[in-house]
Image (cartoon, rainbow, N blue to C red):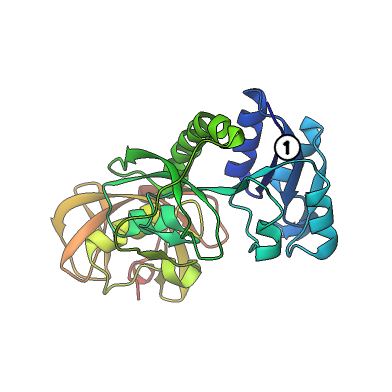
């Protein structure tokens, strides 16, 4: 099959690259972001896509902002089409113009819903029941290009962002494998996006905090949307504690109070309802069952702010 350029950075993009190559897709060049510090020791580490490309024997170009030299390498790759999966860098018009057949992006929502940086988290946080993957042609707008194909799926009850992204990544591979032959042959055409767009901002740790004023529905949505990153958390009188998993429960309790009722650890929320805490991670400790944390905690540590 005619070679393409692949641009991506995180683990789900690396999975896509490996699956495409295993399925027979030739890749002339891989673009990914530069090595970055990772972990507590801040060790410089190459991206999962860079690691995968090296193992597959594909030339790698690392860049956080495509330069004139980078564009020359892209132009000399011999590819006429590029596929982008969570690359993390904006493409200039001059870069877009380098590909005769275009740059195409696998985006993890059904566009125009959830354009932007965090479509999977945003869909869960908003309580959406369905989502999907869109393959679209990149233009100068933010996820505004013509749609080539869509694969939809149901968001399962209690599904967190990590699990949903893994499923969407597999759907994206299938969608790309289905559409690339037509795109490379030049006869597959896109269609304009239809509907009112919504936007998915980049979330940070502050967005993942659960407070005593949150409703039970919102608290659960945060637990699911922000797992594995940045992870929902509560402030226990100045000490942060991550909430790794939780479940709905038909029980009322005092807003902000963590209590033990019928052998279940409940967190009371602002609407008078509760959620059941299942797994937590206190500051400086390993993940543990919420019951184990509760038994070892003091009464003064059982109120969130």
- The reply to whether residue 294 is visible in this rendering is no
Could you tell me which residue is drawn at 55 percent across and 60 percent down? 139
Secondary structure beneath dot 1 equals: helix
Question: Residue 302 appears at what percent x and percent y?
Answer: 34, 67
Q: Is residue 230 above or below residue 270?
A: above
Could you tell me which residue is drawn at 50 percent across and 66 percent down? 202
Residue closer to the observer: 192 or 35: 192
Residue closer to the observer: 260 or 147: 147
Residue topped by disc 1: 52
Name the image quarter holding residue 126.
bottom left
Question: Residue 192 appears at what percent x and percent y?
Answer: 39, 54
Residue closer to the observer: 297 or 143: 143
Question: Residue 294 appears at what percent x and percent y?
Answer: 36, 55
Residue closer to the observer: 269 or 53: 53
Question: Residue 59 appears at what percent x and percent y?
Answer: 82, 41
Name the image quarter holding residue 196.
bottom left
- Quarter of the figure with the C terminus: bottom left
């Amino acid at each position: 099959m005619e070679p393409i350029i692949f641009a991506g950075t995180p683990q789900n993009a690396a999975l896509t690259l490996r699956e495409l190559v295993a399925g027979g897709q030739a890749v002339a060049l891989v673009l990914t972001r530069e090595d970055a510090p990772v972990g507590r020791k801040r060790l410089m580490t190459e991206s999962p896509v860079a690691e995968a490309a090296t193992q597959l024997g594909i030339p790698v170009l690392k860049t956080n902002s495509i330069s004139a030299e980078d564009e020359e390498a892209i132009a000399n790759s011999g590819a006429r089409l590029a596929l982008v999966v969570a690359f993390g860098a904006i493409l200039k018009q001059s870069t877009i113009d380098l590909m005769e057949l275009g740059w195409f992006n696998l985006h993890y929502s059904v566009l125009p819903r959830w354009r932007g940086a965090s479509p999977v988290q945003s869909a869960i946080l908003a309580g959406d029941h369905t989502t999907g993957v869109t393959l679209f042609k990149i233009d100068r707008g933010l996820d505004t290009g013509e749609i080539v194909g869509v694969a939809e799926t149901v968001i399962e009850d209690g599904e967190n962002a990590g699990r949903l992204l893994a499923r969407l990544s597999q759907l994206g591979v299938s969608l790309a494998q289905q559409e690339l032959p037509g795109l490379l042959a030049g006869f597959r055409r896109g269609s304009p996006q239809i509907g009112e767009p919504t936007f998915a901002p980049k979330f940070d740790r502050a967005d993942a905090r659960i407070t005593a004023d949150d409703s039970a529905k919102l608290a659960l949505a945060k637990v699911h949307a922000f797992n594995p990153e940045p992870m929902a958390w509560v402030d226990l009188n100045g000490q942060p504690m991550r909430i790794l998993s939780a479940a709905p429960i038909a029980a009322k309790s005092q807003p902000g109070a963590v209590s033990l009722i019928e052998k279940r650890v409940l967190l009371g929320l602002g609407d008078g309802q509760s959620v059941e805490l299942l797994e937590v991670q206190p500051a400086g400790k390993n993940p543990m069952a919420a019951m184990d944390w509760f038994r070892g905690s003091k009464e003064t540590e059982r109120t969130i702010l």
